Amino acid sequence: MNSYRDLLQKSDSDIFAALEGEERRQQAGIELIPSENYTYPEVLCTLGSVFTNKYSEGYPGRRYYGGQKFTDTIEEIARERAKDVFRCEHANVQPLSGSPMNQAVYLGLLEPGDTILAMDLSHGGHLTHGAPVSFMGKLFNFIRYKTNPVDGSIDFDDLRKTALEHKPKMILCGYTSYPRDLDYTAFKKIADEVGAITMTDASHYGGLVAGNVMRNPFDYGFDIVTTTSHKSLRGPRGGIILCKKEYAARIDKAVFPGLQGGPHMNTIAGIAITLKKAAEQDFHKYGLQVLSNAKTLATELTKAGAHLVTGGTDNHMMVVDTEKSYGIDGKLAEEVLDSVSITTNKQIIPDDPNPPLKPSGIRIGTPAATTRGMQDADMVKLAGWMIETLKNPEDLNLAKQTKSEIESFCSSFPVPGL
Ligand code: DSN
């Protein structure tokens, strides 16, 4: 690895300087974007390896190019490990990331124009769950369900009524900004009543399912589970589709040749490594700590007057209504936290009256901080810094002092691979 770095330093000082800058940024600050994490050094090794040179259209044993002895091995291992970790019958590890992963499921199992019942974007659903601006929203007939912002619950009576009225071909749960766990039994019951396929997009909490600290939708009879590999799972950026055997052929065909060409074999090697680690006891402990850190952070913020959407968290993330809590929009909140080296993202809240680039809240989560070894006591400190910063967004002296305290604090928590 070091020789690669030396070469880069000599041959392209601009990119090398940006790489060093990003390394310093990641080490010096606290990463709270709930979809981000630090991957394993072993994964960094495969990402920067000769596997990136190889084209492998097709699947193990059925490729369109020669020279697949080792690529077949890593893909086969990755698929088997995915099936073991998620306790399911089939796995496809080729999707290039989350959006193509979900697209492949819709295109493989449905016809354009079919109805899908999914969570509304501002209530926590993802762009690929039918937001009108996404191509999927144009291609399929998405009907949306919402959540109760007071307690975060999903009104299953209402959802059932909607399902009976629209007869969706698929009922999709899963989320990108919803801080609660899901009642898969209730979803499945309604889906069975209307004959819909059940799908969960577990991208955010795939690692927490793999680590057996959150519910596994397959235990409730779900048909399809998708997850990205780089969020709570801690792998390289990619997507994994898990499903029952009866859907396997259609899913595989939709991924390749339906949507994609050559899979990124350097990423697939990294996914294989990640899944081996996900089966270990340490990863279970990691998952428990992610959840505990989120609870502690939520409790501390709430004690100091923050309004959390749904009133708290059951998972790794929370959404803070910064307008209501501190009288500032999410864009400003993101910027002031950035100025003290805490990274978050601005976030729309349910039925947000404000526009997406200046929404009413921020979204925060604990997977990355936990990877660095931060624990509950550290979350208490972190909450203190956040509250003071958000309450005093114009106090530049306070920001300078806080930034320096945070950077010194971070030096005790090395970033894996740095
Ligand atoms: N960008 C991811 C997230 O932050 O949740 C989902 O696409």
Image (tube, rainbow, N blue to C red):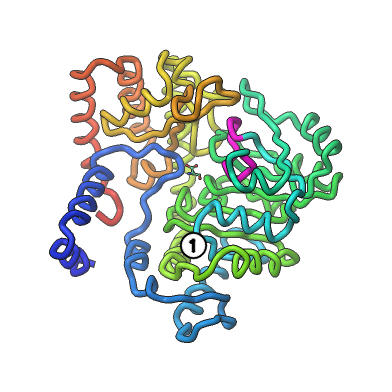
Residue 17 appears in the rendering: yes
Between 159 and 89, the one nearer to me in the picture = 159
Identify the residue at image location x=63%, y=50%: 216
- Could you say which quadrant of the image residue 273 lies in? bottom left
Percent x, y for residue 108? 69, 61
Circle 1 sits in a helix, a strand or a loop, which is it?
helix
Q: Is residue 3 left or right of residue 40?
A: left
Percent x, y for residue 125? 60, 38
* Residue 86 belongs to the span the image colors magenta: no
Identify the residue at image location x=46%, y=43%: 35
- Label 1 amino acid? Leu
Quadrant the N terminus occupies: bottom left
Residue 296 appears in the rendering: no
Percent x, y for residue 415? 28, 49
Tell me the magenta residue range. 121-131
Question: Mark 1 sits on what residue?
Answer: 275
* Outermost residue toward the left in this view: 10
Q: Residues within 10 Å of mark 1 (few under 14, many from 20)?
A: many
**Whether residue 340 is situated above or below residue 217 in the rendered picture:** above
